[in-house]
Amino acid sequence: MVSAARNSWRSISAPNVSSADYARHSKTEVERYDYGLVIIVELKGAAQSRTQDVAGEFIRAEVKCKVTDDIALERWRKLIWNIPFNGLSILAGGIDTAAIVSNENLRQLTLDLMKEVISAANKCGHPLAEDAWREHIKRSEKMGGYKPSTLQDWESGKPLEIEAIWGEPVRRAIAAGGQMPRTEMIYELLKALDHARRSQ
């Protein structure tokens, strides 16, 4: 059962840099460690000249980057990949993206989860194309044996972002009159696994 709604999607400082594929080592050093895109957004209002300036520095360093005025839409777009791959990588026994896309059943479940996320995003007023999943599958097929960040956290014994990645999207979908049954199942299973580990 999904608990009462609470906003676990973190606040964003302005301008904010968002990406799952870059690691920040200091205020001036960022390491790119896999496929991805840097997204820059202002906390309030539309992009400003400073936002474009920051993006320009990333582009000058040959890092893929874009500026957006709709961070909520980009969060949902990111969840198309994060919800299935981060969850299944743990629940299927610590496997990487290559193992997921090459397994017929896991690949189908991944597609079903992606479509569920897209449907929920649209229900919440954040328009995503029905076939937005295609680019994520195509990118995943090129990754090889990549371990999603949540699996890396799990293996390192770090706290998991269960609420931000699975719980909050489910709550928002339900609040908008939608449903995410597959995502909710992953959410509950991960909570149970995490609780069992912390109880040892």
Image (cartoon, rainbow, N blue to C red):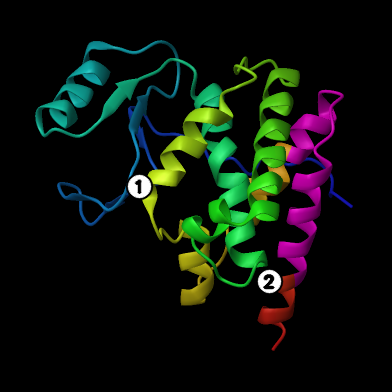
Coordinates of residue 11 in the picture (x, y in percent): 51, 36
Q: Nearer the viewer, residue 89 or 144?
A: 144
Q: Nearer the viewer, residue 44 or 187?
A: 187
Q: Which residue is mark 1?
A: 21
Coordinates of residue 188 in the picture (x, y in percent): 79, 59
| Quadrant assignment, res 142 | top left
Q: Give the SS element for disc 2.
A: helix
- State which region is magenta: 170-192
Q: Is residue 164 visible?
A: no
Q: Which mark is residue 117?
A: none
Q: Give the SS element for disc 1.
A: loop
Q: Is residue 136 above or below residue 106?
A: above
Between marks 2 and 1 in the image, the one whose residue lies nearer the viewer: 1
Magenta stretch encompasses residue 111: no
| In this picture, residue 113 sits left or right of residue 63 | right
Q: Which mark is residue 194?
A: 2
Coordinates of residue 194 in the picture (x, y in percent): 68, 71
| Quadrant assignment, res 186 | bottom right
- For the point 69% across and 89% down, the residue is 200
Coordinates of residue 105 in the picture (x, y in percent): 70, 54
Secondary structure mostly seen in the magenta stretch: helix
Q: Nearer the viewer, residue 31 or 115?
A: 115
Cα–Cα gap, marks 2 and 1 = 24 Å
